[in-house]
Image (tube, rainbow, N blue to C red):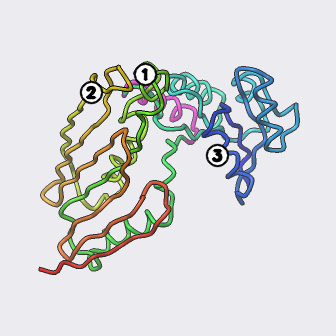
Amino acid sequence: MALRWGILGTGNIANTFATALKVAKKGSLVAVGSRSKSSAEAFGQTYGLEASQCHGSYEAVLQDPAVDIVYICSPHPCHHAMALQAAAAKKHMLVEKPIAMTEAQVRDIIKACQANNVFLMEAYMYRCHPQTRLLVDLVRAGDKIGQVKLIKANFSFDGRSLGPSSRLWRNELGGGAIMDIGGFPNLWRPDLTVLGPVQIEYKSHSKSEVEIIPVTMDETNLFAIEADAVADALADEQLRECKYMTLDDTLGQVRAMDQWRKEVGLRYQEDQD
């Protein structure tokens, strides 16, 4: 049975998701909601929706009986309220990252979904990719790459050219390295569950002296994650260009080039010592 999707939002990531649904085997787009009817209809025309399937409010999508599951891709500060509304409407949901702005909001969403028996997932697409599954399987097997000693995960892009009005440079809109792409490298640690319990040390480097962006933001963040006597993990996210992930192990090193966008495969380099 194919899932019938409703999209809440009409921004760039909504277009990416709707494009993917056009070739999906287990899902189809049946509704879109926006703050204005005209915006929803313009979006819907691009993806083959009828005018009746394009709603001038998010609530209308949640009340649509033809919708099984919603993709919440509104601005970050809106995720919490919209997810609670979706849960109350008994709609399963995929919520664009970050799922919410605070830990308390995340707990609210989880509690609401449990109470209403609806599915909830945060939209980190790389966790469902075959390359990710392969790398996790290699680590769990143990005989291919040995015991993991260090994980280095980087994902960044140059955000300085976007200008001070960009969401990425505004705290109130969920900007900064952590809220935007920081979750990608940091979520690698839970994926490799063989590493056991962890302790996390977080350091933030804010740069108010950036020439192009005269604001204070968490432009660079570093997580030092200590696994329980097994491995260390470093996750570095910056608003500057850099993207890769490496696993240093007892037999050598595995590097996933452009791990987050999946443009290249895995490289394995044996230890020469």
Residue identified by numbered label 2: 207
**Upstream in the sequence, badge 3 or badge 1?**
3
* Magenta residue span: 103-119
In screen coordinates, is 271 left or right of 34? left
Residue 96 versus residue 62 in the image, above or below: below
Farthest residue to the front: give it: 211
Q: Residue at x 11, y 80 (%)?
A: 273
The residue located at (53%, 34%) in the rendering is: 113
Dot 2 amino acid type = Lys
Q: At label 3, which amino acid type do we have?
A: Thr
The residue that mark 3 highlights is: 16
- Left or right: where does residue 94 sit relative to residue 181? right
Amino acid under label 1?
Answer: Arg
Q: Is residue 81 left or right of residue 6?
A: left
> Which mark is on residue 170?
1
In this rendering, is residue 183 above or below 271?
A: above
* Distance between mark 3 and mark 2 Cα atoms: 32 Å
Residue 87 picture location, percent across and down: 59, 30
Residue 71 spot, x, y in % from top left:
62, 38
What element does badge 3 sit on?
Answer: helix
